[in-house]
Amino acid sequence: MKSWESYVRKVVPYTPGEQPKKTKMIKLNTNENPYPPAPGVERVIKDFDVDRLRLYPDPAVSALVNELAAYHGLKPEQVFVGVGSDDVLAMCFLTFFNSEKPILFPDITYSFYDVWADMLRIPYETKPLDADFNISIEDYMTENGGVIFPNPNAPTGVELGQREIETLLKYNSNVIVIVDEAYVDFGAETALPLLEKYDNLIVVRTFSKSRSMAGSRIGYAMASEKIIKYLNDVKYSFNSYTMDQLSIAVGVESVKDNGYFEETLHKIIATRERTKEALAGLGFSFRDSKSNFIFATHESCPAKELFEALKKEDIYVRYFAKPRIDNYLRITIGTDEEMDRFLEFVRRYLGR
């Protein structure tokens, strides 16, 4: 090993979902929205003045911050925008998780959390989900340096109720609690109303799932004015110009078209419920997902075998070779046509 390598910050990186480069496939492995963004987004792109790209964007991202604040009934000073929710969450880790006490998150959850903690040298402990993949809030009622969890959880899709979240907030009033609501729009209850009562709460959202804009990389946090100020202080000390001009413009247009947003959500939820019924009839079991995916296991068919068989047919789902979940598949909800083709293959494979 070269002498300089001893100074390298070595981490085990996050492994994103596979991104195959094929034209004819059914891609149900990364929880992307199967429908296009709001029609106004396409108009913005077509009419965008490329001369604007020679100029730095607004570091405060004021146009998008103001639009999001109005949409959620908050002050602009309560909204922070970043390059996808991953950027926002990483900034939260960097800003607020600086205690020598461990931060807490579930053992089965978004696998970026331990990566950020390792990279930033933040001590952490994982708390096991129960046998039904529920978060046991009693596990978080202990001394810690902060708490973070997705709601609904990923990859399980299981929701933690607002009453339980409030209990958790009350106990952990001296540390930051982050509720990662990447999937909340698909039927779960948001923690946003609790912002009025708890100044240690941060709610994080993304445009990647419900707003069909994973390719634009837009995420945001909502919290007290003091928390947002601290986040901006770190952002301006790290990278002032995080959002590009085009992303800001299309983000604003997406928020404006609430009718299209609701219409798309309703289609995905309807398809999800229909897919649940079909999978249950084929011998799969799963918790009642409140997300845009189903986390399912089969009574007799090993998950890895089905994962490989689907892949040969250019149907991509997500498989995690991890303890406790290595016999489950996470299946993103696609269009009705895509889910019909997926189910048709599964029926043939199982001989049903």
Image (tube, rainbow, N blue to C red):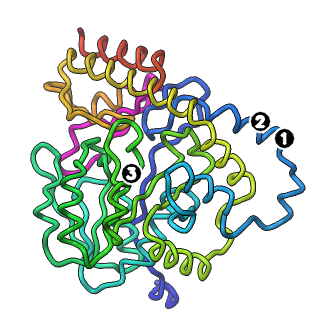
In the image, which residues are magenta?
A: 310-333
Quarter of the image that includes the C terminus = top left
Residue tagged 3: 181
Q: Amino acid at mark 3?
A: Glu
Whether the residues at callouts 2 and 1 have beta carbons within 8 Å, the answer is yes
Q: Position of residue 225 (x, y in %)?
A: 48, 72
Residue 54 location (% of width, % of height): 86, 63
User: Label 1 neighbourhood size at 10 Å, few (<14), some (14-19), many (20+)?
Assistant: few
Amino acid under disc 1: Asp
Left or right relative to 315: residue 144:
left
Q: Between marks 3 and 1, how big is the CA–CA gap? A: 32 Å
Instruction: Determine which quarter of the picture holds residue 111.
Output: bottom left
Residue under numbered circle 2: 43
Q: Which mark is residue 47?
A: 1
Marks 2 and 3 close (CB-CB < 8 Å): no
Q: Secondary structure at mark 3?
A: loop
Q: Measured from the top left, where is residue 126 in percent x and y?
A: 21, 65
Q: Is residue 318 magenta?
A: yes
- SS under mark 1: helix
Q: Residue at x 50, y 58 (%)?
A: 74
